[in-house]
Amino acid sequence: MEHKQTIAIEIGLQTHVLRTCPIHHSIFCDDDVDPSGAFALAVELVRQHTPYVEEFHDDAHALTDLLSDTIGTAPLSCPHCANLAQPNTGRSVGADLSVV
């Protein structure tokens, strides 16, 4: 996984927009959480020149675009738990993001 995407995932996890399944350690999107806090944090980290986000070279737009894409492509529930609860239909529940 690219380091920039790891930063976006960690911002999502910190703001609870993304969650980690306690059983499978897969990341999924918590649709009940307003993502605006994640975007506000991302912009503030860039504006404050936080070393953690220095790879984005003061480009808050690049970080928020990546964060939006990361949140948008995350499944709405743990794909492994969903597969256990439903019979195998051969369809994917969503992207398989895992905590490294």
Image: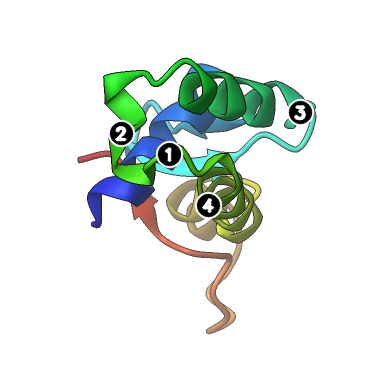
- Looking at the rendered image, the quarter that the N terminus falls into is bottom left
Q: Earlier in the sequence, mark 3 or mark 2?
A: 3
Quote the CA–CA distance across marks 3 and 2: 21 Å
Q: Residues within 10 Å of mark 4 (few under 14, many from 20)?
A: some
Residue 96 seen anywhere in this rendered image of the structure: yes
Amino acid under label 1? Ile
Towards the viewer: 56 or 84: 56
Question: Can you tell which mark lies on residue 62?
Answer: 4
Task: Write down the residue under mark 1.
Answer: 9
Q: Residue at x 33, y 48 (%)?
A: 4
Q: Residues within 10 Å of mark 1 (few under 14, many from 20)?
A: many
- Check contact, mark 1 vs mark 2: CB within 8 A: no
Quote the CA–CA distance across marks 1 and 2: 16 Å
Question: Can you tell which mark lies on residue 37?
Answer: none
- Check contact, mark 4 vs mark 2: CB within 8 A: no
Query: Residue 50 at x, y = what percent?
Result: 36, 18
Q: Earlier in the sequence, mark 3 or mark 4?
A: 3
Q: Residue at x 63, y 27 (%)?
A: 38
- Check contact, mark 3 vs mark 2: CB within 8 A: no
Residue 98 seen anywhere in this rendered image of the structure: no
Taking the image as shown, residue 80 lies to the left or right of residue 18, namely left
Task: Tell me the element at label 3.
Answer: helix
4 vs 1, front mark:
4
Task: Write down the residue under mark 2.
Answer: 54
Amino acid under label 2? Glu
Q: Please identify the quarter of the rendering in which residue 18 is found.
A: top right
Towards the viewer: 67 or 14: 67
